[in-house]
Amino acid sequence: MTLQERINAFVALGKRIDALPEYELDELAFRAENNNNWFTTDQVKLALQALVKMLDEAVLNEWIGNYEISDHPMSKKVGVMMAGNIPAVGFHDLMVVLLTGHNAHVKLSSTDQVLIKWLVRELSELAPELAKRVVFEEMLKGMDAYIATGSDNSARYFEYYFGKYPSVIRKNRTSVAVLDGSESKVDYKELAKDIFQYFGLGCRNVSKIYLPDEQQLQGFLDAIEGYHFMLSHHKYLNNYDYNKSIYLVNGERHLDNGFLLCKQSEDLVSPVAVLYYEVYQDKEALKQKMDAQEEKIQCIVSKGAWYPSSFEFGQAQTPSVGDYADHVDTVAFLMEL
């Protein structure tokens, strides 16, 4: 297949997802949630709509147009170790491997066994020749290259086994918000999307906020009261109750609006149902701190995207197709094999 034919196959997949009848979508979401209770129907639909936007014809052509990809490159076996923290999170890696003309040998996460397989089946109906380049594996041995996503602990395992091969090995990352004191209730509600979408489990979810005045927190917590429904999910509720109990037993200072705990901490990654915060003295000191933690931050959000290289509130989970995980250009990596 030529490059344009490969692109067209993914465009067709995006249209197929977008045109999916409601009953099929509900059935797919049910199976995904049955495999992983964090993947609720709403979260699955949200993730699939994000794929529809990613697979837009103009978007894909503009993105791939930045590279000089051969129609018939030397095909390599690329092992893809997928994460399973949010629905279909490994799809981008799969698409990049296929668009660059390689074969994808996929090790699925145990928590995302349904969606990726469904997407490949749909792709096989639209472009059988392309889908033949996808092989699901239990173990990734004898590959020419690897793309592995996991935690800091699993990254050490990946480095040990895959480090001698060309590889992209991703570690823990999270996202943060920077406030300047001018935020309104509307801004806070948009920021809440960045915190609560996918229950805060993604690397693009905001797990910490930096603000100039701790008093802002009360206004923020009041403004996001509409997210009280998060407690209707039993796993989120369990995390909220557990962390609240720990803070109370240990006498740790925190704020609580009934469904979200806010705790002052210099750490970046907060537990589910907890939002860390830190007060900064001035913007220069803040910049120095952020620069020092650059390798642990996936993205930053701020009101109107005033902070350099940040997204607007509410946009953390809507990255462009060229916003690479860990800021590593996987297309360029695969083109060099």
Image (tube, rainbow, N blue to C red):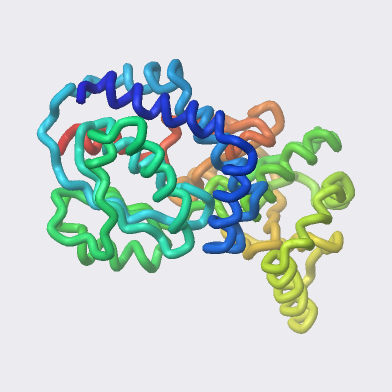
Q: Point out residue 69 in the picture as x, y percentages from the top left corner.
A: 21, 23
Quarter containing the C terminus: top left
Q: In which quarter of the image is residue 223?
A: top right
Q: For the view shown, which residue lies furthest in the bottom direction?
A: 249
Look at 24% across and 38% down and name the residue there: 333
Q: 301 and 24: which one is in front?
A: 24
Q: Point out residue 79 in the picture as x, y percentages from the top left corner.
A: 24, 52
Q: Point out residue 41 in the picture as x, y percentages from the top left corner.
A: 65, 50
Image-based side of 293 in relation to 62, left or right:
right
Image-based side of 218 in relation to 246, left or right:
right
Image-based side of 116 in relation to 211, left or right:
left
Relative height, residue 306 to residue 82 (above, below)? above
Q: Looking at the image, can residue 134 be seen?
A: yes
Look at 18% across and 49% down and name the residue there: 145
Q: 150 and 52: which one is in front?
A: 52
Q: 282 and 266: which one is in front?
A: 266
Look at 22% across and 60% down and name the residue there: 140
Relative height, residue 55 to residue 38 (above, below)? above
Q: Looking at the image, can residue 207 be seen?
A: no
Image-based side of 109 in relation to 185, left or right:
left
